[in-house]
Image: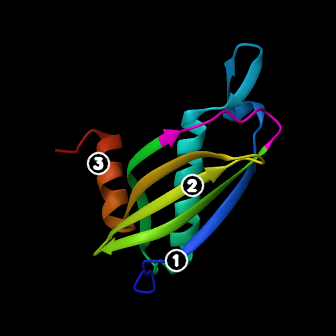
């Protein structure tokens, strides 16, 4: 993760399928939960190649603004920029566009984790032995 620096950018494009929509009147449109997932997946894409063996990443927070509807069948594009690195905490600013306009924006924090510690904690919780 030492190679992650503010100013790094990536983008991701999705087609709005039925599974990503909610119903608004007679229309199916890109849902806010799907936009949130889209933002997370775009930031994840930027971070993943920079992790060392034994490291993973989790989302901490998403502050999202859904500004306009996108109908089913259209494409959406998320642009993510890493704006801050504070030890293992990574902060992103993201913008979401459809084929016509900007439809969303978000601030998103991710955290780089030690996978062994995370899995041990998760296992203890599954087994009912977590404190």
Helix or strand or loop: what does disc 3 sit on?
A: helix
Vertically, is 12 above or below 74? below
At a point 69% along the width and 19% down the height, the residue shown is 23
At a point 27% along the width and 38% down the height, the residue shown is 128
User: From which residue to which does the magenta span run?
Assistant: 65-74
At a point 46% along the width and 70% down the height, the residue shown is 82
Q: Which percent across, then down, holds residue 49?
A: 56, 77
Q: Which percent across, then down, holds residue 35?
A: 58, 42
According to the image, label 3 marks what residue? 124
Quarter of the figure with residue 31: top right
According to the image, label 1 marks what residue? 8
> Between disc 2 and disc 1, whose residue precedes?
1
Mark closer to the observer (3, 1)? 1
Q: Residues within 10 Å of mark 1 (few under 14, many from 20)?
A: some
> Between disc 2 and disc 3, whose residue precedes?
2
Mark closer to the observer (2, 3)? 2
Query: Given the current orientation, which residue lies at the most extreme front position?
Result: 101
Helix or strand or loop: what does disc 1 sit on?
A: loop
Q: Quadrant of the N terminus?
A: bottom left
Query: Given the current orientation, which residue lies at the most extreme left position?
Result: 131
Q: Residues within 10 Å of mark 3 (few under 14, many from 20)?
A: few
Task: Tell whether position 23 is magenta.
Answer: no
Quarter of the figure with residue 73: top right
According to the image, label 2 marks what residue? 95
Dominant SS of magenta comes to loop
At a point 42% along the width and 54% down the height, the residue shown is 107
Q: Is residue 23 left or right of residue 105?
A: right
In the image, 130 versus 68, the foreground residue is 68
């Amino acid at each position: 993760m030492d190679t992650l620096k503010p100013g790094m950018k990536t983008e991701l494009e999705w087609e709005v399928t039925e599974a990503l929509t909610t119903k608004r009147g007679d229309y199916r449109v890109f849902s806010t939960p799907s936009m949130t997932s889209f933002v997370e997946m775009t930031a994840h894409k930027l971070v993943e190649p920079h992790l060392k063996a034994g490291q993973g990443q989790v989302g901490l927070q998403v502050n999202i603004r859904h500004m306009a509807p996108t109908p089913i069948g259209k494409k959406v594009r998320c642009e993510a920029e890493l704006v801050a690195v504070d030890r293992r905490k990574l902060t992103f600013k993201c913008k979401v566009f459809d084929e016509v306009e900007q439809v969303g924006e978000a601030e998103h924090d991710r955290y780089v984790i030690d996978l062994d510690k995370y899995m041990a904690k998760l296992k203890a919780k599954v087994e009912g032995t977590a404190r």
